[in-house]
Amino acid sequence: ESKDHIIAKYGWIYWNFLVACTCTLQLGASIQSLVYYSILLPAQILDLVGDEKKGSYLGLLMLGGGIIAIVSPPLIGMISDRHSSRFGRRRPYIVGGILLNAGALISMGFAGDNGSEGEAGTNATPWNVALLIISFILICFGYNLMVTAFNATVFENPIVPKDMFGTSSGIIGALSILGFGIGTALGTMVTPFGYVSTYVVLAVLTSIAGFITVCTYKEERSDGYEVLPQGRVESGSQSYVSVSSSELNDEDDMLIIADSVSHAETKTESEAQVRVRRFEKLSWKVFVKNLADMWSPFKIHDFRWVFISRLFIQMGVYTVQEFLFYWVEDIIPMEGLSTATETSFLFIPVGLTAFISALVVGKLSDALGGKRKVFLFWSCMTMALLSILLSVTESYVIAMIIFAFFGFAIGVFMSLDYAIVCDVLPDDEHVARNLGVWHISIVLPQLFAAPLAGVILDAFQKLGKQTGVGNLGYIVLFVSTAFYFIVAALLFKKTYCDTFFL
């Protein structure tokens, strides 16, 4: 349906509400990604194994989780694309992921107490460690299962036409930022209430958010066929069948199309004419064929450059994020405030400004005919400039101001993150698989950005002490972050998805 028809049918305010409801899973995923990986897991490992072993345990778990996050989304997406079910292709995987994730989160809470029975490092038993590792693996699988299937719904959402991808993406970006804020608040529960209670609350929040998406996302059943709306862009390689109104069954007004190989597909259709696409149902032959073709999206010019650009942006983001705590402690400490509190306060202006820009820029890009590159280019260049300013900043107040502007810039990126990948997806037959491949651009920086930044920081801090420049390590760290953002900005210009200038 066109934008005008959608707005006339639902109204602008109600449409925004509906899109937000279909995307609330992103809210839950953002809550979990912040509080679990940034607060709960590191603290729990410290309590279990102590200070001396915390780094190695956390590093090994994150490495294993990264491998799962690289391998599983494309495979899950490929299977989901070929799934045949009366409930659709995506919802069964979203529901399965929600339940697995929630159960594993709750079991994670029982893997160790937060020091109530002794000092940090004295609570570890083979049972605790085994439960923690098993729960962690199941959380990784459950999280990737529900998120991979959800990502496909963003592209396939029937109430979001192509010329409203920017607005929809902006809503998702705003939900992500809101989730980070809720996750930060949830992290304060650990000390007074313990791990079990915190994990239960986290499991409940993510499950509620996920099931709102499941209940509000309208998905057709996928018993081997998919009904496409009239006027939707079609791939020339697909096979389509036109069906006239005379072929509708007068008795029950159901459209029945049978195939000698596939099961019959039954659909209610009120329009006089529909188009039906038949796709291959999943089999071992189809699985192996698609597995061999897994990386074919990189053959598409725009998809390839959007992937690489996003990878460099995430390299910059994780370089700042992972070492911000140490930078605050070493460069801009404030008397009377803990480093954790100072660091948390820095995220307040980031969240506020990012939330505003995420909502505004997505809609603006749609109003300008789907312009994305110009916003993403200047977003990256702005973050590069601000990173350089942070490298020479020694004032907490100035840092707060810089972070407010940083929030505007990162909010622009988050508002268009989904929109630009939806613009460049090579086809609509392998949506979940291709988005699973795209998801790797987040995971790879998680694996490599922090270790590389750690080497840079330690080496240049040591050199700085020898040369009298005490914060040399942080200067080089922020300059390297600026380099990542500049490279991302330049690579965005290589895409053909829209013209660069307004």
Image (spheres, rainbow, N blue to C red):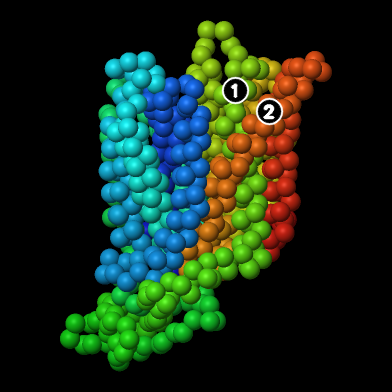
Return the residue nearer the eye: 207 or 349.
207
Measured along the vertical axis of the image, is residue 464 above or below residue 284? above
Q: Where is residue 214 in the image (x, y as percent from the top left)?
A: 31, 55
Rendered location of residue 129, percent (x, y): 35, 33
User: Residue, x 61% and y 50% (percent of image)?
Assistant: 310
Q: Position of residue 95 (x, y in %)?
A: 30, 54
- What residue did someone put label 1 on? 326
Q: Mark 2 points at which residue?
A: 457
Which residue corresponds to the image point at 28% horizontal and 82% vertical from the top-left? 263
- Name the side, left or right, on which 380 lies relative to 421: right
Mark toward the start of the polypeptide (2 vs 1): 1
Asked whether the beta carbons under mark 2 and mark 1 sit within 8 Å of each other, the answer is yes
Q: Nearer the viewer, residue 57 or 152?
A: 57
Residue 262 image offset from top left, x and y in percent: 32, 83
Residue under the image location 59 percent in, 27 percent down:
324
Q: Nearer the viewer, residue 84 or 9?
A: 84
Above or below 260: residue 52: above
Whether residue 312 can be seen here: yes
Quarter location, residue 137 = top left
